[in-house]
Image (spheres, grey):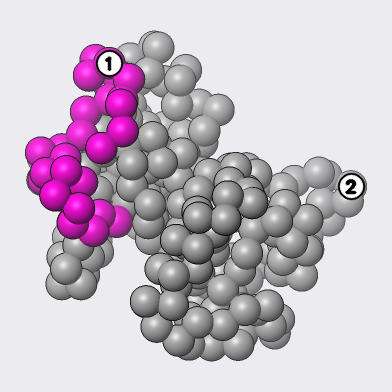
Amino acid sequence: MPHLPSSELVVVHEDVRDALDAGVGVVALESTILAHGLPHPDNVEIAGQIEDAVRAGGSVPATIAVLDGVVHVGLGATQVERVCTDPDIAKLSVRDVGVAAALGRSGATTVASTSALAHLAGIRVFATGGLGGVHRGASETFDVSADLGVIASTPVLVVCAGVKSILDVAGTLETLETLSVPVLGYRTDAFPGFYLSDSGHPVPWRVDSAQDAARVVVTRDRLGTDTAGVVL
């Protein structure tokens, strides 16, 4: 496990720490979907289902959140319940994490901040729903999610369901290309649109096994040509 900031700022759950030390797979999970994306008590139930799915695949889940100014990589049941029920939980992107930590605030992590904090903890895989992306009309509003820029500078494999279909999918894919972020389709040639299996846009690369996806990540590390993440 990499050297982390002071334990006053970052706490890695014992199960996650043991898995990282033993070389067991760890999958980071965001918490914004729990705090702001789903109603209670459905969010508590779904949080358990997501973590159980990771365990069923042989890995250890690490849901990430900031509680009272401390980054938690991996949450216990009581902490998950708090994230799911506390009305004062903020939504934290990367720019907000340090501010929340300094002020002792609590917040749920987005795709961007989860990717960054997973990397900080030495976690290479992050699973989520839909990425943020380029919004329609962005040429006038400049509304582009911070998710894209962070993924471009953070070497984490982001397993997702594409981007939300209300976004400018073509513009998002073009931006990922500009940022040198490889996009892989897992057993598909189509780029998904969140709850749609096909957004109408193709993926540039396809892999048909988890081993192939892992080989892409490892080979890119060995080549050292860039530090961008990979979208799967």
| Number of numbered callouts drawn | 2
For label 1, the residue is 6
Residue at image location 27% in from the left, 16% down from the top: 6
> Which quarter of the picture shows residue 104?
top left
Mark 2 sits on what residue?
A: 140
Magenta extent? 1-27
Q: Which mark is residue 141?
A: none
Say which quarter of the image contains residue 53.
bottom left
Label 1 Cα neighbours within 10 Å, binned few <14 / some 14-19 / many ≥20? few
Circle 1 or circle 2, nearest the eye? 1
Q: Answer whether residue 20 is magenta in the image.
A: yes
Occupied quadrant, residue 202:
bottom right
View extreme (front): residue: 222
Q: Position of residue 11 (x, y in %)?
A: 21, 28
Drawn side of residue 122 relative to residue 213, left or right: left
Q: Is residue 43 above or below residue 159?
A: above
Amino acid under label 1?
Ser
User: Can residue 12 be seen in the rendering of this structure?
Assistant: yes
Q: Is residue 222 left or right of residue 171?
A: left
Residue closest to the eye, 169 or 15: 15
The correct choice, above or below, for 29 with respect to 18 in the image is below
**Magenta highlight on residue 232:** no
The one of 141 and 51 positioned closer to us in this rendering = 51
- Decide which of 29, 194 is in the foreground and name it: 29
Task: Name the quarter where the N terminus is drawn.
Answer: top left
Residue occupying image coordinates x 27% and y 47%: 63
Residue found farthest to the right: 140
Secondary element at tag 1: loop
Q: Residue at x 29, y 56 (%)?
A: 27
Name, please, the residue furthest toward the top: 103
